[in-house]
Amino acid sequence: MNINPIKAIYRFNKEAGLLDVPYSHAKEAAYPIEEMLETFPPLDVLATKVNAVDSSPKQVSRSIITLADSAPYEPTEVDLLDKHIDAIVFSFGSIFKLGLTPQEAMNALQIVMEANLQKLKNPSLDSEGKLSKPDNFYGPEERLQKLLDKRGS
């Protein structure tokens, strides 16, 4: 059986009734965070230990992950693969809730990947090994806005 995975994600979200629920920024952000943290120790242990240098999402997430990763816990490869696939399913569900069709979601993915690929031209890594944006980086925001303005038409 050969199916388009994004269309399958759309169908899953549609048939599960998840697209009938209004978009909630907090809830949509919570899903992938929840998925990512599933393979770490219980959050009550982490909640008392997070001590971020600043309150940026980048720093807080790095603090949480640093603390979580320091606890003895060994997820299986199946656990890891499952959490990443679930994050993709939730993320595309969130995209569809914004009113994009599967084709528009593919176009958005292409736009973001084209922007991300710019980072490979002159690779520079931050202290955590994340690729930095080059000085002449052209972000995807303008093209994504155009796509959003035309969605569903």
Image (cartoon, grey):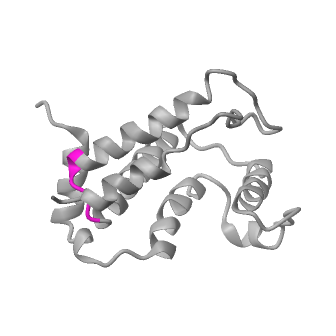
**Relative to the observer, which residue lies in front, 60 or 38?**
60
Is residue 23 on the magenta stretch?
A: no
The answer to whether residue 52 is left or right of residue 16 is: right
**Screen quadrant of the C terminus:** bottom left
* Residue at left offset 65%, top offset 43%: 74
* Residue at left offset 48%, top offset 45%: 140
Q: Position of residue 128 (x, y in %)?
A: 78, 39
In this figure, what is the number of numbered marks?
0
**Relative to the observer, which residue lies in front, 69 or 27?**
27
* Residue at left offset 30%, top offset 48%: 105
**Screen quadrant of the N terminus:** top left
**Relative to the observer, which residue lies in front, 148 or 92?**
148
The answer to whether residue 72 is left or right of residue 91 is: right
The answer to whether residue 102 is left or right of residue 76 is: left
Rendered view: 63 above or below 1: below
Q: Main secondary structure of the magenta part?
A: loop
Q: Position of residue 37 (x, y in %)?
A: 60, 57
Boundaries of the magenta span = 99-103
Residue 55 visible in the current orientation: yes
Rendered view: 59 above or below 21: above
Figure quadrant of residue 55:
bottom right
Residue 86 visible in the current orientation: no
* Residue at left offset 75%, top offset 53%: 62
Figure quadrant of residue 64:
bottom right
**Relative to the observer, which residue lies in front, 40 or 34?**
34
Q: Position of residue 96 (x, y in %)?
A: 28, 60
The answer to whether residue 49 is left or right of residue 105 is: right
